[in-house]
Image (cartoon, grey):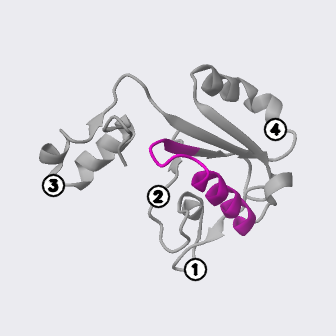
């Protein structure tokens, strides 16, 4: 979705370029903003992890990104509880901003969800509609 000035984020422009055959025609109407990067970060982690994550959290804040922190004590440590927290956060943010979620913890703290083919996966966390595995929330890749 374009912003008021008709721009989209770099990440969305790259995604559109890879997905749409007519991107060369549409791009002039949805210009990527290569100067400002507007995005939001959600960190979900078990209680006690904040000290270790603080340098990364502070780095994101220092760069002007919007950051929300939740612990599994707040979300619950179930797939449904964490997905609900992600969906609520995602829906509370402007559609024009990219959204990244970083989930920190072993599977006993951030459990795998049961995917569409009854297989354990963490892909369900990136899907906010609960129907498919299409990512609405971008995941940090390290």
In the rendered view, would you say 13 is above or below 135? above
Q: Residue at x 18, y 38 (%)?
A: 28
- Is residue 21 shown left or right of residue 72? left
Q: Earlier in the sequence, mark 1 or mark 4?
A: 4
Report the front residue among 77 and 26. 26
Q: Position of residue 91 (x, y in %)?
A: 58, 56
- Give SS at disc 2: loop
Judging by the rendered image, the residue that carries numbered circle 3 is 21
Q: Residue 118, which numbered label?
A: 1
Cα distance in 3D space between marks 1 and 4: 31 Å
Q: Earlier in the sequence, mark 1 or mark 3?
A: 3
Q: Residue at x 32, y 47 (%)?
A: 15
Q: Report the label total.
A: 4
Report the front residue among 77 and 119. 77
Residue 123 on the magenta segment: no
Contact (CB < 8 A) between labels 1 and 4? no
Q: Residue at x 80, y 34 (%)?
A: 50
Judging by the rendered image, the residue that carries numbered circle 2 is 135
In the rendered view, would you say 137 is above or below 31? below
């Amino acid at each position: 979705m374009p912003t008021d000035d008709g721009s989209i984020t770099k990440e969305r422009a790259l995604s559109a370029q890879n997905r749409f055959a007519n991107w060369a025609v549409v791009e002039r109407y949805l210009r990527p903003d290569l100067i400002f990067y507007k995005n939001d970060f959600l960190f979900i982690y078990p209680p006690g992890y904040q000290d270790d994550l603080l340098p990364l959290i502070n780095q994101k804040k220092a760069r002007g990104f919007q950051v929300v922190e939740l612990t599994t004590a707040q979300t619950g440590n179930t797939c449904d509880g964490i997905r609900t927290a992600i969906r609520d956060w995602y829906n509370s943010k402007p559609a024009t901003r990219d959204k990244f979620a970083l989930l920190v913890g072993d599977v006993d703290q951030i459990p795998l969800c049961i995917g569409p083919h009854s297989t354990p996966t963490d892909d369900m966390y990136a899907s906010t509609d609960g129907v498919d595995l299409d990512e609405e929330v971008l995941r940090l890749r390290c």
